[in-house]
Image (cartoon, grey):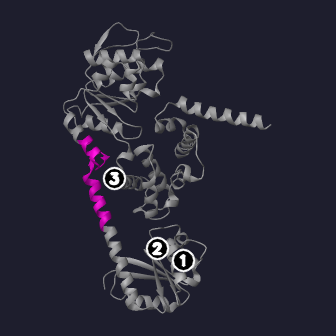
Amino acid sequence: MPDPVYSVLVIDGDVGVAEDFSRALLGMPVAVLRAGDRAQGISFYREFLPQMALLDSKLDDEEVPLHELFLGDSGLEVVLMTDRWTRAAALAAVARGASDLLSKPLEPSKVRQMLSGFIATAETRRHTQELDNELLQAYQFQGIVGRSPRMLEVFSRVRRVAPLFQTALITGPTGTGKELIARALHYLSPRSGEKFVVCNCSALTETLLESQLFGHVKGAFTGATHDRAGLFEHSNRGTLFLDEIGELTLAAQAKLLRILQSQELQRVGSPVTTTVDVHVIAATNRDVRELASKGNFREDLFYRLSMIEIQLPPLADRKEDLPLLQRHFLRHFSTKYGKKIDGISRRAQILLTRHSWPGNVRELENVIGNACMMAQGKIIRDIDLPEAIRVQITGPDSGAGIMTLEEVQSRHLDYVLKLVDGNKARAAEVLGVSRATIYGMLARRIRQVVQKNELSA
């Protein structure tokens, strides 16, 4: 007899049922566990995590969906047994999630047929998982996962331009992986052995931005107690990544353009020019063309940067990458947290597929990371997902009625804030707006509540 590969839990007060079941499966790679009542059965399930559970209908709680008896594991095959099935009872059992029905006393041929089908399905899933693992290895590019046509085109473009670029512009919504693409450009370039320096332009105040980028001399402004090199000098002979380039002031844009054209810079407060050799990659989630047309971004700088432009699609436009990304983050976080998590239940996968992912790949990373922390078994179940994923807003049909645009924005802001644990700076990143916009929306909501209370008083 082959070594047991699959395990089945039989929950029945009659010892003979488990014995009959075991005899029927002689020669098959199945181990049989027996529990005398439902409480013991649930305890055994938590301890041994069998792939199938057979439950005597007398021990069933007909008010609860069958999978809820076993920690909501929708990947578990649950079979109900009884000595007499009626059509109505059978339909009700299937509606509550029963994978199959057995009549007692058990017929060996029926038991073997059922288990053979179960093993064949399980083998198909295992083979699919192996193929997914192989695909994950095949469709990784410099640590970026994707097999959709749009991402394969991005990878191809990066390979072609990396050895040649001096400036590049990466555009796309927040959370799509612009910094990863920038790093790929650097590491595939002849400068891969030099520094890769990151500057988040939106995180710096207008007064500090020029000093941070170009450096300053002692006495240039209040607090400038000594000379300081900027990021351009720090990244000399390497690559400087300017994230959120659309937040640069027009004055800073003019200085940046000069450096790109002449490779010379002046520290703030100094008339002396310094020569640098820096490759610049800029990124933004804003429409730079629109900014330029409105006079908020220099057209000459835009054309200088966009000689090579790489556009990243939102996750909603590349949902064929979702299974690979899920497995990638699952592997990453299960290793990081020291937990053996093999997969995601079918019910959880459905919820993840239905979600619109406004925060793109970064949001998916947060969700899978959170679920890995919450998971108690070998798979991520729907109850391990954040509430915002489980209770999805589907529009007017969700029972909220027709909402104004402001109400839709307010509800979505609540969802994102809950996802990032109330971190307003992170919420601004996910939504692609400034922190001032977030605070403005919250302040407007408070004013509306106050006005409503005053009217009711």
The part of the image, by quadrant, that contains residue 437 is top right
- In the figure, is residue 369 to the left or right of 4? right
Amino acid tagged 1: Ala
Q: Disc 2 or 1, which lies upstream in sequence?
A: 2
Label 1 neighbourhood size at 10 Å, few (<14), some (14-19), many (20+)? few
The part of the image, by quadrant, that contains residue 59 is bottom right
Picture quarter with the C terminus? top right
**Residue 395 spot, x, y in % from top left:** 53, 49
Is residue 128 located in the magenta-colored stretch of the structure? yes
What residue would you read off at disc 2? 48
**Callout 3: helix, strand or loop?**
helix
**Residue 137 spot, x, y in % from top left:** 27, 54
> Does residue 249 lie above or below 198 as drawn?
above
Q: Nearer the viewer, mark 2 or mark 1?
A: 1
Amino acid tagged 2: Phe
What residue would you read off at disc 3? 320
> Does residue 306 lie above or below 383 as drawn?
above
Q: Which residues lie in the magenta part? A: 127-155
**Callout 2: helix, strand or loop?**
helix
**Residue 408 spot, x, y in % from top left:** 55, 42
- In the figure, is residue 189 to the left or right of 426? left
- In the figure, is residue 264 to the left or right of 82? left
The residue furthest right is 457
- How far is disc 2 from disc 1 in space, using C-alphas? 28 Å
> Does residue 233 lie above or below 134 as drawn?
above
What residue would you read off at disc 1? 92
Amino acid tagged 3: Glu
**Callout 1: helix, strand or loop?**
helix
Residue 351: image tag: none
